Every structure is written in C-alpha cells, then in structure tokens.
Image: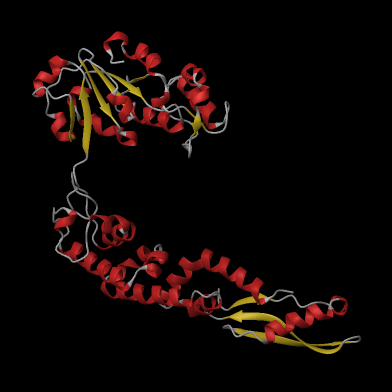
C-alpha cells in the first residue's frame, strides 16, 4: 500500500529526472500531445487476507487518501470481502500535467515562476528554448531585480556584441564583474545561442575585454636584472613579459609562492610562479623556449597532471623533486589531496612519473597521498636546485 508521502517522494524523484523534458513540453505547448501524460500511480491495494490481518493500518491508509487535497484525481474501487464486507479503496492516482506534479510536491510556485520567466525570454528570443531549459534553478531562484538585470544585460550584449568594454564600463545599473561571474553560465548560453561570435584575443564570450592576468616572475641573476632596471620580482601581463629580451639559460616553473620567494641568486636563471593549470600561458613567451625548463609542483595527481600539460608545449621540460624517492622520504609530512585528478593515464610523463601517478591514483601508499612542495625541507631542496647559491 503506497501512502501519499511515499507517492510524493516518488514524484520528487520523477520531477528532478524529467524536469527539463517537461519544461520543453510546456514551453512549446506539446504537453497535451505527449504519450507520457497522464501519469498514473498504482496505490497497491491490499488483498483481503492482508487487510484482515492489518485492518487498522488499511483503514488509516484509505483514510489518508480520502483526505487527499492534492492535484490530480484518485480512482476508487469497491471490494466485497467475505470477512470484512464491502470496502471502498483507492486504487490509483492520476496526474494530467507537469503542473499537477509540481503542485503535488510543493514546487508549484517555482515551476510557474520558471515558465513565466522562460516565456518572457522566448518572447524576445524564440531560439533560446534549449538554452534556458538547462537553467531551471537559476530562473526559479532569481529575484525580480536579478531577472530584470539578466534580460536587460542580454539585450545590451546583443546590441553591443563587440563592445570591447571592461565589465565595470557597462552602462547598466547593477551590472558589474562579480554579478557577471555569478550568472555567467546562463548568460553565456543565451548570448551564444542568440548571436554566436568567434572569440577574439583578449575578449570573453560576451565580447567584453578581459582583465589582464599578470604572470609573476623572479629574475634570479643580477646581470639579467640589469636589463629590467634592476627589478627582481615582476608581475605583468604575459604580452609584456614576452617583449623582454632575457637570455635566460634556466627557467624554474614553481607552484607555491612562498617556495618561489625562497630561491636565492642563480646565474642565468629566472623563475615563474603560481600558474597551476594555466601553465600553458608561458608558451607565448619567446625566451622561455630557449631555456632549460624545470617544473616543481606538489607530489600529487594534479601536480603531475600540470607537468603533463606543460610538456605539450615544452616537451623537454624536466621535473624536480617530484619523484617516488622524495615522496617516501618525507612520509611524515603527507596530507590528503582533497580531490584527485580523474584522468586514468597522462600523456607526456616519463615512465617513472607515470608509475608515481598510478601509485597515487590507486592509493598504493595511503589514501589520496599528497606531499606539498613547500613542506619539503629547504636544505634538501637546495641540493637539488643549486646548493650554495641559494639563500638559507
């Protein structure tokens, strides 16, 4: 016997699973033509034997459906039982539309709000049905103010497809960088659906100018520093770094900032820090390609994944302090990697690095083992980097 609460739990799962399809049906008015509806749930009426053994339970179950105030309609059946006499029992619940389902699970206000807001968007841009179908949660949760901002911003972007403005320069009240980032998913889907555009260098999907992302470098050789006014620590857009003429013989690519700042003077050497998975940005710097490149990151699955990515444009890059020996040497300093890289096998790794990667992924030495590079004792690291030329 299925109770109202049990049916509502099933309906919640159905709603989550079919919400996008139901939205598309409702948006184009085809719901009444769909074979999916009406949606019927058998309530599993008991046999006479079961009812006789659990008569109070059966009465409570039938009474619950008798008091059903939800949508749809309940079909009843009369049973004539020898020991219990005539009984009227609920046999099935029938829901005719997705509106009925939404009302049944307490989602009616959100569902109607989404459909109304979707229709408002479709009235302006009929081609966006598929795009907005993926953004139910956003359309349901937006305040009226944010929804008005959404539509006005999309309209402005269509009219100014290649504005070249920075986000803060957009002449619309309430539109700023953080707001755009928070709503970027639905904005991008709508704009690219309405008015596709090939991306241009330095522009985002909206045709807005992207803020330059400075790359931070340290020039470790005093003679090389003389070429840039004596500066050692520089953060500048990659285009400006590419224009420098730096005869760097050895380039360290180091993840951790504090580790990077611990490097001392080294002849003909420089260091680039903190790029993470954005490591490919340095491929646009000409003097990088003539240097011996050395990557040092955490010994974990993502550190090795970044190394593999770097080798797609710098195939001769070698790693430092990212080997099994270093990992096992400092096991007391291990922590857990929050979330491991999901790629089963990485191209570009050496045989030893690949074995290390597989060992980490399969928890050969412990659960999600990670040795952060800044935890490696500095005296140990100095010997691998350059020894006495480094600050202590």
What percent of the width, then of the height, locates residue 254?
A: 32, 26
Residue situated furthest front in the rendering: 392
Identified at 15% across, 61% down, the residue is 160
Residue in the image at 10% along x and 19% along y: 226
Q: Quadrant of residue 206?
A: bottom left
Residue 79, by quadrant, is: bottom right
For this view, does 333 lie left or right of residue 280? right
Residue 347 visible in the picture: no
Q: Residue farthest to the right?
A: 83
Foreground residue among 194 and 386: 386
Q: Which residue shows up at 61% across the image and 81% down it?
A: 94
Q: Which quadrant of the rendered structure holds the C terminus? A: top left
Color style of the picture: secondary structure
**Residue 66 image point, x, y percent:** 69, 87
Asked if residue 372 lies left or right of residue 278, the reply is right
Q: Is residue 124 visible?
A: yes
Quadrant holding the N terminus: bottom right
Q: Residue furthest top?
A: 388
Is 151 or 257 nearer to us in this picture? 257
User: Height in image: 161 above or below 263?
Assistant: below
- The tally of labels here is 0
Indicate whether 42 appears above or below 265: below
Residue 135: where, in percent of width, then height? 39, 63
């Amino acid at each position: 016997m299925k109770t109202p609460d049990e049916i509502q739990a099933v309906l919640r799962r159905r709603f989550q699973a079919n919400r996008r399809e139901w939205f598309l049906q409702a948006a184009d008015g085809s719901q009444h033509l769909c074979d999916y509806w009406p949606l019927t749930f058998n309530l599993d009426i008991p046999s006479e034997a079961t009812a006789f053994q659990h008569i109070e339970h059966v009465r409570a179950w039938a009474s619950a459906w008798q008091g059903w105030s939800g949508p749809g309609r309940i079909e009843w059946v009369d049973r004539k039982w020898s020991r219990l006499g005539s009984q009227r029992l609920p046999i099935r619940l029938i829901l005719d539309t997705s509106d009925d389902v939404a009302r049944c699970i307490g989602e009616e206000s959100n569902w109607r709000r989404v459909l109304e807001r979707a229709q408002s968007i479709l009235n302006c841009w009929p081609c966006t049905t598929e795009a907005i179908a993926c953004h139910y949660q956003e359309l349901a949760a937006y305040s009226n103010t944010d929804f008005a901002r959404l539509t006005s911003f999309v309209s402005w972007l269509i009219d100014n497809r290649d504005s070249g403005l920075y986000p803060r320069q957009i002449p619309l009240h309430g539109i700023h960088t953080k707001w755009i980032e928070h709503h970027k998913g639905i904005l991008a889907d709508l704009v690219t659906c309405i008015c596709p555009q090939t991306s241009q260098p330095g522009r985002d999907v909206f045709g807005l100018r992207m803020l330059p992302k400075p790359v931070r470098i340290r020039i470790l050789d005093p003679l090389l520093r003389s070429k840039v006014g004596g500066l050692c620590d520089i953060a500048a857009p990659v285009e400006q770094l590419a224009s420098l003429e730096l005869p760097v013989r050895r380039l360290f690519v180091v993840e951790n900032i504090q580790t990077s700042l611990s490097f001392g003077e080294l002849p003909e050497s420089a260091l680039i820090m903190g790029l993470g998975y954005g490591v490919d940005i340095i491929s646009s710097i000409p003097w990088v390609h003539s240097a011996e490149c050395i990557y040092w990151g955490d010994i974990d699955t993502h550190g090795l994944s970044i190394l593999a990515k770097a080798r797609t444009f710098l195939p001769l890059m070698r790693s430092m302090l990212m080997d099994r020996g270093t990992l096992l040497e400092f096991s007391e300093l291990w922590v857990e990697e929050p979330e491991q890289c999901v790629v089963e096998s990485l191209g570009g790794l050496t045989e030893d690095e690949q074995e290390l990667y597989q060992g980490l992924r399969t928890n050969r030495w412990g659960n999600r083992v990670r040795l952060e590079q800044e935890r490696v004792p500095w005296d140990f690291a100095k010997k691998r980097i350059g020894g006495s030329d480094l600050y202590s």
